[in-house]
Image (cartoon, rainbow, N blue to C red):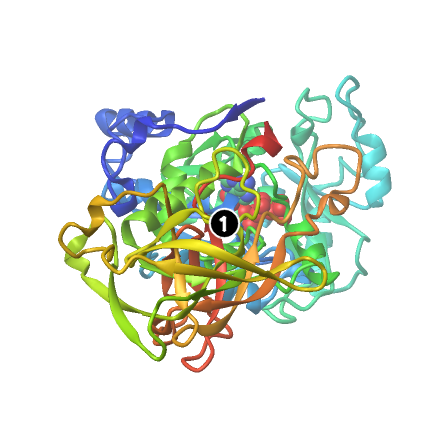
Amino acid sequence: MQIMTLIEDNLKDNPATGSHPPPGSNFIRAIIEEDNRAGKWNGRVETRFPPEPNGYLHIGHAKSICLNFGLAHDYNGICHLRFDDTNPEKEEQEYVDSIRDSVRWLGYDWGSHQHYASDYFDKLYEFAEYLIKQGKAYVDSLTADEIRALRGTLSEAGTNSPYRERSMTENLDLFRRMKAGEFPDGAHVLRVRIDMSSPNINLRDPVIYRIRHSYHHRTASKWCIYPMYDYTHCISDALERITHSLCTLEFEDHRPLYDWILDELAEVVPCHPQQIEFARLNLTYSVMSKRKLIELVENGLVDGWDDPRMNTLAGVRRRGYTPESIRLFAERIGVSKADSWIEMSVLEDCLRHDLNERATRRLAVLEPLKVVIDNYPENHEEECFAPNHPQKLELGTRTVHLSKIIYIERSDFMEAPSKGYFRLSPGMEVRLRYAYIVKCVNVVKNADGEVVQIHCTYDPGSKSGTPGADQRKVKGNIHWLSAKHARQAEVRLYDRLFSHAHPDAGEQDYKTFLNPNSRKVITAYVEPSLYQIQPEDRFQFERHGYFIADARVTTPEKPVFNRAVTLRDSWIKASG
Ligand code: ATP
Ligand code: MG
């Protein structure tokens, strides 16, 4: 499989703000434009995003959402949100709500077009009776195992069920009694009569109805028979008059069944959408199957569905991703017919790209080291001015106070500097960002030999922003906070959830690749202005990365920050 790192082509305009690729720029657009030229749908473009409400949406779904809603938007069409709820045991209202939230958060609106497959249960039943009457469906009374055993293999044809030739009357009677609840689960199924020797196993008389005495989240106990996905999906598309039914490649072999069912029902459902398959998103350092995501949640390996390390949309949102960055990602990766892996760094770069433009800059010292400026007057403090955005001066400046004792980042001091280290070390000078040049004159250590405090002197003529002062250049430029003014805040340093690029590709259980360092909680010092913020406000902590005020626990009295992404990709070596 091809590994994709960056596609720069789509970046020439500014996709984060909603521009879209030129016409015909992917094969689906080419199909739509050809259909429009030929007048196939009278210029109508109607798509749908059809999640099963059995889990939270993940970043893979975002690809499908952006594609379906994006195409509808670009061709003045409509995109439906359809809950594909044919599986009563696994579906819940919580999932429906979270799916609606996530699609809306991504910036899409389905208007009045919210549907449920369960809205069509009556019709689906009616069409099943129609197929029976046409001699195209029969009730089979084999067990699931027996049906499987007769299905054949890729190289061997299947065998007809002994019940395949039941009379139409008997089939209808049995099917009605299945519906009436006369039989236990598994006693009978309804199958379509296609061809047990078809080279395509999906066409070997697939089951379209099964008995399930289960409570359904919307139809309650009305039904004890439920239609199967393949049967339901094409009919739901047709009833909603979908024009282009986009799905992932694993459904390619199901397309003949999709078409067979709609052809057989042409008289009663006069619409036949076109199924078009595209490659699903595979993202390195993550798992994309709902079953595995549920397992992570249920086993407490993460803190719920919106744990900032999860690749659910609720998770990436809490992590600090913006809807714009996800839409940019969908645009950068494009759509194709070939399966590929997308590097996690592509997703992370999209966030950097978006937040670099938009995030206000702030100072935070994550791992503090105390510095005393010996020649700075006691009890004195002064204002320094820091731009809110280095390129967007119209966003103004903020005041950062300086006083005699400050904190710098521990990593900005080295007692014995390595070659090329231009930050603080004994006898060396650095500029305190937006303030003065300081020189390290002394180092204080504890009994273990660990540096606990350093002493500097400052050059009073070197203050940033005063005429002439910036001319005196020093190589290092570090951030700092006045000890007297800085405030403490909890900061959660998140990293990738898995330390292996393909956690579920090999023999080993994907859970063994969980990254033990995916979350580190620290108490940092931050600018006082970071206390007057709202949940979900995003900032760049200078030299550290992009951070978001956690949506769940941030209050004005106690901000808590999640690191969304570092400023640079620290995984390049690891994944190379
Ligand atoms: P499961 O993991 O249970 O098979 P699913 O991921 O297929 O579920 P659905 O709710 O059926 O989940 O998905 C809704 C839509 O999202 C489908 O049209 C599906 O093709 C699409 N989709 C799901 N995963 C991806 C992915 N990784 N990339 C692109 N589209 C996806
Ligand atoms: Mg699915």
Q: SS class of the residue under badge 1? A: loop
Q: Is residue 434 above or below residue 204?
A: below
Lateral position of residue 392 relative to residue 309, left or right: left
Ligand 1 picture quarter: top right
Q: Tell me, yes or no, if residue 548 can be seen here.
A: yes
Locate residue 168, reporting x and y percent. 68, 43
**Residue located 54% across and 48% down the image:** 414
Toward which corner of the image does residue 111 lie, by quadrant?
Answer: bottom left
Q: Residue 119, position in %: x, y? A: 49, 60
Q: Residue at x 42, y 31 (%)?
A: 335
Residue lying at the far bottom of the rendered structure: 557
Percent position of residue 332, x then y: 38, 34
Going by the image, does 281 lie left or right of 273?
A: right
x and y percent of residue 371 in the render? 47, 64
**Which is nearer the eye, 78 or 166?**
78
The C terminus - image quarter: top right
On-image quarter of the N terminus: top right
Q: Residues within 10 Å of mark 1 (few under 14, many from 20)?
A: some
Pointer 1: what residue?
426
**Which residue appears at 28% of the width and 25% of the height?**
24
Q: Amino acid at mark 1?
A: Pro
Report whether the residue tagged 1 is closer than 8 Å to ligand 1.
no
Residue extending farthest top: 155
Using the image as rendered, state which of residue 215 and residue 527 is in the foreground: 527
Residue 180: quarter of image: bottom right
Q: Left or right of 27: which side holds 369?
A: right
